[in-house]
Structure formats: C-alpha cells, structure tokens
Amino acid sequence: MLNNWSVPIRRVSILGSTGSIGTQGLEVIDQHRDKFKVVGLSAGSNVSVLNDQINKFKPEVVSVKDEEAKKKLLETNFDYKFEILAGKNASAEVAKYPCDVVLNGITGAAGLLPTLETLKAGHKLALANKESLVIGGKLVLDLAQEGQIIPVDSEHSALAQCLRGEKKSEIKKLILTASGGPFRGKSTEELKNVTVEQTLNHPTWNMGPVVTINSASLMNKGLEIIEAHLLFGIEFEKIDVVVHPQSIIHSMIEFIDGSTMAQASPPNMKLPIALGLSWPDRLMNVQNPIEWTKSQSWTFENVDDKVFKAINLAKKVGKAAGSAPAAMNAANEECVSAFIERKISFLSIVEIVEQVVENHLSGSIFVNNQKLTLEELLNIDELIRIESRKQINNLRKD
C-alpha cells in the first residue's frame, strides 16, 4: 500500500493533458505531490488550459499541436524556462522524455506513435488510449516488456486487479460491463433521429465527446473487447459483455470452479488513472468508496446486438486481426467526426463502419498478418479514412 510508499518520487508525463483523462490525471497528482512530479505535458490547441497546467505543475517539456498554438503559448510570460515542442509528432517526443510513467490520454489513432515511443524508451505506460493497442496489436505487444503496460480503461483496470495472483489456466471467462449508454433499451426506430446533444448525455460517466459517442454506439465496448484479448491473451470466445446500467461493477472474471471475482467502485475515472500511475501499489483516498449500508440495486442484462451491432463487428475484426482493427478504428473516427458535424445520423456511424470494414476484408489492401510495421498501419489508416469520407459524402447525396 502507498501509505508505506517505498519508491522515489515518480516522474510523470501526461499526453493529452487538457482532455478528460489528462485533467483528471493531474488532479490525482495534485493530491499526491509527495509521490509524483510532472515533467512533461502534451496538449493539442487548448492553450489557455495548458497555460494554467504549466504554471501549476512546472513541467520540463511541453508540446502542442502546431506552430500557431506554440506562438500563443509563447505570449505568456512564465516564471521559469522549459522546452516547447510543436507539430504532429511532438507528443511522441514528450513520450520519449526521461520519466518513470507516461499517461497516454490522447484520443484515437494519434496515440499510436506516442505509445510506441513510450515503450521503446522503457517507461511504464499507463494506457488510456485503447486505440493504439487495438491498431498496433502485435507491434505494440512485441515492444512491451512484461508489466510495462498498465491499463487505465476502467474495465481493463478492473480485470488487472482481479487477476492479481490468479492463474490464467483457471480463467473460464472475462466479462466486461457496459453501462448501455444514453440509448439503452431503445429500438432502431427510436434511434433514427437522435441528436448529438442526446448522444453526449451519458447517464453515469463524464468523458470526452468521442469516447461518449463511442459509448452510446457500443463501439467503445467493441474496441475494449479487442483490447482485453490483446492485454490478457484470452481468446474472443471467452470474452463476454453484459449491460450494467449503474456502472458500479467494472468487470468480472469467471473461474473454472464456478466462482466469479468482480471489481466494484463508483463510476469515476480517477481510480483507474491513479492505479495506472502508482501500479502495483495503491494511493490513499483517491475517491469515496461504495456506501454498503445504503440501499441500492445493481442490475445486469444482455446486450441488444440487433440494435447495437458494434460488438459483433469488433469480434469479427479482432479475429481477422492484421490490418482489420486499424481499418475499423479509422472508419469509426471519421464517422464520429461526421456525426458531430451533423453530416450523418447516429445509426449511420456503425452502418458505414461495417461497410468499410467489409470492403477492406475483401479488398487488396487487407493484410492478413498478425504484425504490421508502423508505416503499413499509417498507410492503411489514411486509405481507410479516404474511403470512409467517400462513403459519408455518398450518403449525404442520397
């Protein structure tokens, strides 16, 4: 336990520092200044928030999206000197900077290169950017040393906690829980005209917009199935999803003797973030525990995979492996952006992704290989984005 903290102060870099994961990570660190020192911050273009973070945590290196953001940052008179990087790969440079732990809170495929650079540098990786593992697959896993990747997704953090000291041979099933999002119980007909605002109104979690939309479509859970398969080496047939609207149980493991182990805590990302930073130890008082004397009900139900098709699609993609996960992710990112911009409907997100994936699996650029190079993955990512934008534009013309 960390009340008997026996390691030196951990030097931490936060990638995506102005986003949901990044800001919560900094809140955890702020509560435990005697255990962590922020040495690197990587952000996009939210310079005002980044300014405040720099003044508060005094990092040694900072990166921003482009030269325009760097110019804005330089307009502030800081009371100390630090290195400022800018550009597409600047966050990867922060990932390489000497530290103990990198919290990768970047959203989407943009997190892949920073993940690879973190692992190459030998830093612990607190991974909230599930897409980099889903896309990179064996490329990422082959770089990682045993125990180097610490999952920050609440579901995978829960599984990692439940698996401490357990034998893989005794696992019968991994069970990921899903809140069901804002549209749980809705029919396809009822989802035809839902708005962006309705989609972003998540009933239990406070997350960034892309993750919230992915949660509503259950694409997030599909990505998490692939992530669980890669992290824990469990075949897809042994990974299930159940809907748990209260979001108290974050995942469960069913063992061969019929027992089930679950991790429970109120829905708050600070707990898995804190564990990602401090693993294998725990920090004191990260959040309030469950009130066991308070009357409450926890319910579970099946996923309606006729309405929410992303989970079965993800399993198909995960089994195909090779370039398929990268294709699914790229198509989904383009479709989510189009939905946010009111170019397509909510239901069109998964419909287009499914069509793009089917075309990819039967096309000439599908690579049926467990391991691809970074260059190959980035090339496929770009080609799929072009194809997805064509599909989006064609749908708008109809």
Image (cartoon, helix red, strand yellow):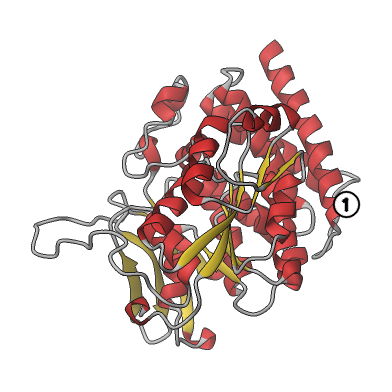
The C terminus: image quadrant: top right
Residue 342 falls in image quadrant? top right
Residue 236 is at least partly visible in this image = no
Q: Horizontal placement of 257 versus 167: left or right?
A: left
Q: Horizontal placement of 333 versus 55: left or right?
A: right
Residue 343 image point, x, y percent: 61, 18
Residue 334 is at least partly visible in this image = yes
Residue 249 vertical position relative to residue 337 in the rendered view, above or below = below
The N terminus: image quadrant: bottom left
Residue 180 image point, x, y percent: 38, 45
Residue at disc 1, secondary structure:
helix
Mark 1 surroundings: few (<14), some (14-19) or many (≥20) residues within 10 A:
few
Q: Horizontal placement of 389 versus 100: left or right?
A: right
Residue at screen point 43% across, 84% down: 256
Residue at screen point 71% across, 41% down: 330
- The residue closer to the viewer here, 242 or 339, is 339
Residue 37 vertical position relative to residue 82 in the rendered view, above or below = below
Q: Residue furthest right?
A: 364
Q: Horizontal placement of 219 versus 255: left or right?
A: right
Residue 176 image point, x, y percent: 44, 61
- The residue closer to the viewer here, 199 or 49, is 49
The amino acid type of the residue labelled 1 equals Glu
Q: Residue furthest top?
A: 397
Residue at screen point 56% across, 45% down: 310
Residue 307 vertical position relative to residue 340 in the rendered view, above or below = below
Residue at screen point 50% across, 60% down: 152
> Mark 1 sits on what residue?
375
The number of numbered badges drawn on the structure is 1
Residue 372 image point, x, y percent: 84, 60
